[in-house]
Image (cartoon, grey):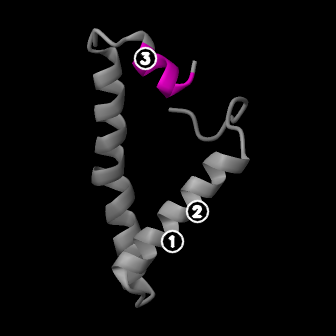
Amino acid sequence: MTLDEMIKQNSKNDGLTREAIDEVAELIGGKLIPEVIRIADKYNYDRDSMVKYCADLYYTMAEVATFENWEGDKE
Protein backbone atom coordinates (compact mmCIF):
# COMPACT_ATOMS: atom_id res chain seq x y z
CA MET A 1 0.00 0.00 0.00
CA THR A 2 1.37 3.40 -0.92
CA LEU A 3 1.52 6.22 1.60
CA ASP A 4 -1.13 8.12 -0.40
CA GLU A 5 -3.42 5.09 -0.28
CA MET A 6 -2.76 4.67 3.44
CA ILE A 7 -3.60 8.31 4.14
CA LYS A 8 -6.84 8.09 2.12
CA GLN A 9 -7.84 4.82 3.79
CA ASN A 10 -7.16 6.21 7.26
CA SER A 11 -8.92 9.52 6.68
CA LYS A 12 -10.41 9.26 10.16
CA ASN A 13 -6.79 9.16 11.37
CA ASP A 14 -6.46 6.24 13.73
CA GLY A 15 -3.02 7.49 14.67
CA LEU A 16 -0.98 5.06 12.59
CA THR A 17 -0.73 7.36 9.60
CA ARG A 18 0.27 10.31 11.77
CA GLU A 19 2.86 8.18 13.56
CA ALA A 20 4.41 7.09 10.26
CA ILE A 21 4.56 10.66 8.96
CA ASP A 22 6.01 11.91 12.25
CA GLU A 23 8.68 9.21 12.18
CA VAL A 24 9.75 10.17 8.66
CA ALA A 25 9.79 13.87 9.61
CA GLU A 26 11.97 13.03 12.63
CA LEU A 27 14.35 11.08 10.41
CA ILE A 28 14.66 13.96 7.94
CA GLY A 29 15.12 16.70 10.53
CA GLY A 30 17.01 14.68 13.10
CA LYS A 31 19.45 12.66 11.00
CA LEU A 32 19.34 13.34 7.27
CA ILE A 33 19.58 17.13 7.15
CA PRO A 34 22.27 17.37 9.85
CA GLU A 35 24.38 14.85 7.92
CA VAL A 36 23.87 16.71 4.63
CA ILE A 37 24.93 19.95 6.35
CA ARG A 38 27.97 18.22 7.86
CA ILE A 39 29.02 16.97 4.42
CA ALA A 40 28.47 20.41 2.85
CA ASP A 41 30.64 22.00 5.52
CA LYS A 42 33.31 19.31 5.22
CA TYR A 43 33.71 19.95 1.49
CA ASN A 44 33.04 23.69 1.71
CA TYR A 45 29.80 23.63 -0.33
CA ASP A 46 26.89 25.99 0.12
CA ARG A 47 24.50 24.33 2.60
CA ASP A 48 21.29 25.34 0.81
CA SER A 49 22.62 24.12 -2.54
CA MET A 50 23.63 20.79 -1.02
CA VAL A 51 20.22 20.27 0.60
CA LYS A 52 18.49 21.14 -2.68
CA TYR A 53 20.77 18.80 -4.62
CA CYS A 54 19.98 15.94 -2.21
CA ALA A 55 16.25 16.69 -2.35
CA ASP A 56 16.34 16.67 -6.16
CA LEU A 57 18.31 13.42 -6.14
CA TYR A 58 15.86 11.77 -3.73
CA TYR A 59 12.90 12.98 -5.81
CA THR A 60 14.46 11.60 -8.99
CA MET A 61 15.11 8.23 -7.35
CA ALA A 62 11.50 8.08 -6.18
CA GLU A 63 10.27 8.84 -9.70
CA VAL A 64 12.41 6.34 -11.62
CA ALA A 65 13.13 3.52 -9.16
CA THR A 66 11.20 0.99 -7.16
CA PHE A 67 12.10 0.02 -3.62
CA GLU A 68 9.53 -2.76 -3.27
CA ASN A 69 12.16 -5.49 -3.04
CA TRP A 70 14.98 -3.38 -1.60
CA GLU A 71 16.85 -5.17 1.16
CA GLY A 72 19.25 -2.49 2.37
CA ASP A 73 20.47 -2.28 5.93
CA LYS A 74 17.79 -3.82 8.11
CA GLU A 75 17.49 -2.90 11.76
Q: Residues within 10 Å of mark 3 (few under 14, many from 20)?
A: few
Alpha carbon separation for disc pair 1 and 2: 6 Å
Please name the residue shown 28% across and 13% down the image: 13
Residue type at mark 1? Tyr
Q: Would you name the residue on which mark 1 appears? A: 53
For the residue pair 65 and 40, the one nearer the viewer reads as 65
Q: Residues within 10 Å of mark 1 (few under 14, many from 20)?
A: few
For the residue pair 9 and 20, the one nearer the viewer reads as 9
Residue 1 position within the rendered picture, expressed as x and y whole percent measured from the top left: 58, 18
Location of residue 22 by image quarter: top left
Please name the residue shown 58% across and 62% down the image: 57
Residue type at mark 2? Leu
Boundaries of the magenta span: 2-8
Q: Residues within 10 Å of mark 2 (few under 14, many from 20)?
A: few
- In reply to whether residue 6 is colored magenta, the answer given is yes
Q: Give whichever of discs 3 and 2 has the lower sequence position.
A: 3
User: Any mark on residue 8, and which?
Assistant: 3
Alpha carbon separation for disc pair 3 and 1: 30 Å
Residue type at mark 3? Lys
Q: Would you name the residue on which mark 2 appears? A: 57
Q: Are marks 1 and 2 in contact (CB under 8 Å)?
A: yes
**Chief secondary structure of the magenta span?**
helix
- In reply to whether residue 51 is colored magenta, the answer given is no
Q: Report the mark closest to the observer, 3 or 2.
A: 3
